[in-house]
Amino acid sequence: MSPRGRRRGRVIPVLIACFYAGVAVGWWIHAAIGDPHPEALVATSPPAATIGEANESTGEPLGTVSAGPPRVAAVSPTAETIGADPIAVLRRHDLRLPLEDDVDVDDWKGHFAQRRGGGARGHEAVDILAPRHTPVVAVEDGTIARLFNSKAGGITIYQFDPTEQFCYYYAHLQRYVPGLHDGQRISKGEVIGYVGTTGNASPNTPHLHFAIFQLTDAKRWWEGRPIDPYLVFKD
Ligand SMILES: [Zn+2]
């Protein structure tokens, strides 16, 4: 490989991009303690016009259809696209916790591997209990990739990191901070919303469902490889 061809995101041949487009796996998280969490569905390049609409049966955006492997791991980027262990990369991003309140990261251990939907899906996120209306803050600088309201996740935020390698997902919000919009640049620590119980969260258990996923080369807000936040934030 020539040195000038080594730029990440450009190095993967068109053939591989086409392959991924065919088998791309949609990734999704919906949290509710004790409730089923539809997530980790399969995606095939949803038309832009359908992205904002939810599938009635699953709460997934239309376009995330089961046309390929059901697990997001199937699109694990190759070593060439990652370039490094994504957890190690994220730890160097020096993320801050997503709530203004104190958070005990040790409590997150095992959340990621929990099963949802009667065991059909992985949780692939952490649930952070907090009083309703607790401010939710951006874990890093970045961009609001999408504000999305889904049946399962409720009021949610998808945020890209500054390098657009990762997406942070905040779900079950009570509401957004006023004025928040798609494409908005945000700063680490900036309040973006408030803890709630929208979506399939139990009304008696306000919490933030927080997830991280590694974007594919296509950099689509609904698609990626889930990463355990506990491994990123733990001491
Ligand atoms: Zn959850």
Image (cartoon, grey):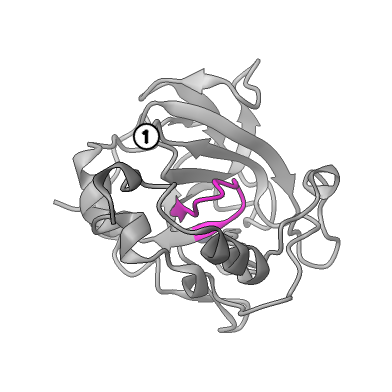
Residue shown at the point (28%, 37%) measured from the top left: 95
Can residue 32 be seen here? The reply is no
Q: Residues within 10 Å of mark 1 (few under 14, many from 20)?
A: many
Residue underneath mark 1: 139
Q: Amino acid at mark 1?
A: Val
Residue shown at the point (51%, 36%) measured from the top left: 159
Residue 49's spot in the image, x, y percent? Answer: 85, 43
* Vertical order, 144 against 178 (above or below): below
Magenta-drawn stretch contains 48: no
Residue 112's spot in the image, x, y percent? Answer: 40, 66
Main SS of the magenta segment?
loop
Residue shown at the point (61%, 83%) measured from the top left: 118
Residue 132's spot in the image, x, y percent? Answer: 54, 37
Name the image quarter holding the N terminus.
bottom left
Give the residues in magenta.
213-224
Can residue 186 be seen here? The reply is yes
